[in-house]
Image (spheres, rainbow, N blue to C red):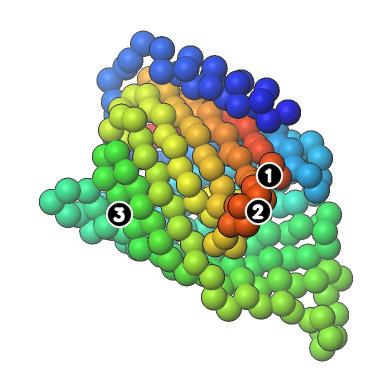
Amino acid sequence: MRRRFVVALVLMLGAIASLAQVQPTDTKYMISLHTGYAHNLTYGSYATFDLDAYVPIHQHFDMQANLRTSTANSHSLGVQLRPKFALPVGELYIEDRLMMRFVACDEFNEFLHAISLGYMMEYVNVQVGVYTRVIQPLPYIPRSEDELICEPFDVLYRVEAFVRPRTSPWNISLALSNVDNYQVERMWQPMFYLGGWYDINEHWRVRMSGKLKLAGMFHLNAHYYASELRVGAEYRF
């Protein structure tokens, strides 16, 4: 399973890199649709469906909204607000993240708030912050013994590298993080990402990405837990 997943992802990203280049365009408003195949040792195989929107409210402030549903009966909704500050090289940003997950298959809701500081350059993006998570068992019974589970403090991080400048019409990226648009893991459970995009024209972009999650990363006995492959298109206007 893992070998077929990695081979398929490498072949598709290689195809992206080999396509003819087009002139880069400025990113403005963006809406995207993705579908994916995922597998993990808990749920087995399932499909994901994502709807994402990016809104540049101001030159120094933007927001992003993300919605995911899956055939595993797990669903998430998230919003990120980002003030940005231009530097001589790259830009500094603050990200305020709100996320809610409805995990019907495991009978709980999850509410998360995170604040982080990031530094974005042409080839590198580094982000670190903290988050608080509240888990609500389902069905919810007020004033019961298992009313809420609170994780008041944990660390989130992301280190991402690009093979070309971010404004390029095609690119490939590699990332290590415990956070993405649809979930946040505990700090000792990092996820590995490999992704890429290709601009068809000034409005349409296609994206492909893969994710690998290992269990036991900090116990010198890491083994496969989950993987995901996504493909989709975004429209910029």
Task: Examine the rendered structure and indicate whether residue 74 appears above or below residue 146.
Answer: above
User: Would residue 34 be found to the left or right of residue 101 on screen?
Assistant: left
Task: Examine the rendered structure and indicate whether residue 220 appears above or below residue 152.
Answer: above
Q: Quadrant of the N terminus?
A: top right
User: Would residue 66 be found to the left or right of residue 109 on screen?
Assistant: left
Tag 2 near tag 1, CB within 8 Å: yes
Task: Examine the rendered structure and indicate whether residue 18 appears above or below residue 123.
Answer: above
Q: Nearer the viewer, mark 1 or mark 3?
A: 1
The x, y position of residue 98, in whole percent, is: 54, 64
Residue at which label 3 appears: 119
Q: Quadrant of the C terminus?
A: top left
Q: Earlier in the sequence, mark 2 or mark 1?
A: 2
The residue positioned farthest toward the left in the image shown = 88
Badge 1 amino acid: His
The residue positioned farthest toward the front in the image shown = 220
Q: Residues within 10 Å of mark 3 (few under 14, many from 20)?
A: some
Badge 3 amino acid: Tyr
Give the camera-side residue of 119 and 86: 119
Query: In percent of the image, x 57 and y 34: which residue is there?
Result: 210
Report if residue 154 is visible in the image. Answer: yes
Q: Quadrant of residue 43?
A: top right
Q: Quadrant of residue 171?
A: top left
Residue at which label 2 appears: 216
Residue at which label 1 appears: 223
Secondary structure, mark 3, is: strand
Query: In percent of the image, x 83 and y 54: which residue is there?
Result: 105
Give the camera-side residue of 235 and 6: 6
